[in-house]
Image (cartoon, rainbow, N blue to C red):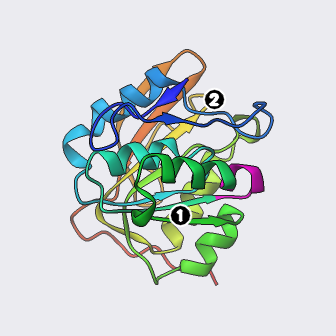
């Protein structure tokens, strides 16, 4: 059973989707690991969750003091679960939930929105992390100092990519978690995709 670990919604039980073919929720120990790595850097952040699944990562961040979360998923069933979970945790007023493909969403907000904490938990089988990071940075939606948390099924990220600095890596069973930062210093602008 999934629940919120700490914060204003501590202990709230979260609904999950039936069958992992639709979505694969982040395991409790992986979620605990992620939040212990960023625990002092969550307050006030604007969150983007591009493969939100059940919404648990964004809701955990909101429970710990993040200011707002945008949760995107292309599955209609996932969107229904996210909405239920946002209501259960009483955090729905801090959420924007939309059913879209991640790539469509990034195109629609390119240069218009800014985020300071991004969760990427794409389907492991598709090995899409590099492609997603490229589209994310080209969309020009990361504020300086933004943290990007990327979950993958293989250890595929070994270096700084697309203006993001790799700064922490963790391994839990079949899950690899890579933390990257969009530097505070001005870096060369990544050209927007036309």
- Residue 128: x and y, percent? 68, 47
Magenta-highlighted residues: 73-79
Report the disc number at residue 136.
1
Foreground of the two, 139 or 44 = 44
Residue 104 image label: none
Question: Does 109 appear in magenta?
Answer: no
Magenta residue check for 76: yes
Q: Position of residue 125 (x, y in %)?
A: 76, 35
Q: Position of residue 46 (x, y in %)?
A: 35, 63
Q: Secondary structure at mark 1?
A: helix
Q: Answer left or right for 148 relative to 106.
A: left
Q: How many marks?
A: 2
Q: Residue at x 54, y 47 (%)?
A: 85
C-alpha distance separating marks 2 and 1: 20 Å
Residue plotted at (22% across, 63% down): 184
Judge whether 109 appears above or below 162 on screen. Answer: below
- Check the image and report above or below for 176 versus 78: above
The residue under the point 62% across, 28% down is 154
Please give the residue where the numbered disc 2 appears in the rendered image: 153
Regarding mark 2 in the picture, which secondary structure is present there?
loop
Residue 60 pos. (x, y %): 39, 42
Residue 51 showing in the rendered view: yes
The crowding category of the residue bearing disc 1, from other C-alpha atoms within 10 Å (few below 14, some 14 to 19, many at least 20), is many
Does residue 169 appear in this view? Answer: no
Of 124 and 6, the residue lying toward us: 6
């Amino acid at each position: 059973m999934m629940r919120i670990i700490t914060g204003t919604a501590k202990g709230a039980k979260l609904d999950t989707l039936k069958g992992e073919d639709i979505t694969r929720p982040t395991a409790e120990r992986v979620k605990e690991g992620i939040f212990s790595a960023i625990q002092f850097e969550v307050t006030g952040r604007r969150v983007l969750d591009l493969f939100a699944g059940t919404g648990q990562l964004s809701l955990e961040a909101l429970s710990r003091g993040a200011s707002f979360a945008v949760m995107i998923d292309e599955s209609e069933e996932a969107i229904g679960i996210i909405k239920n979970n946002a209501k259960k945790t009483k955090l729905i007023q801090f959420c924007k939930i939309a059913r879209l493909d991640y790539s469509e969403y990034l195109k629609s907000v390119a240069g218009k929105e800014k985020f300071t904490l991004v969760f990427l938990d794409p389907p492991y089988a598709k090995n899409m992390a590099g492609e997603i990071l490229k589209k994310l940075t080209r969309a020009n939606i990361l504020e300086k100092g933004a943290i990007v948390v990327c979950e993958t099924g293989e250890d595929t990220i070994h270096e700084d990519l697309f203006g993001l600095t790799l700064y922490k890596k963790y391994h839990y069973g079949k899950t690899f978690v890579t933390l990257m930062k969009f530097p505070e210093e001005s870096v060369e602008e990544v050209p927007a995709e036309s």
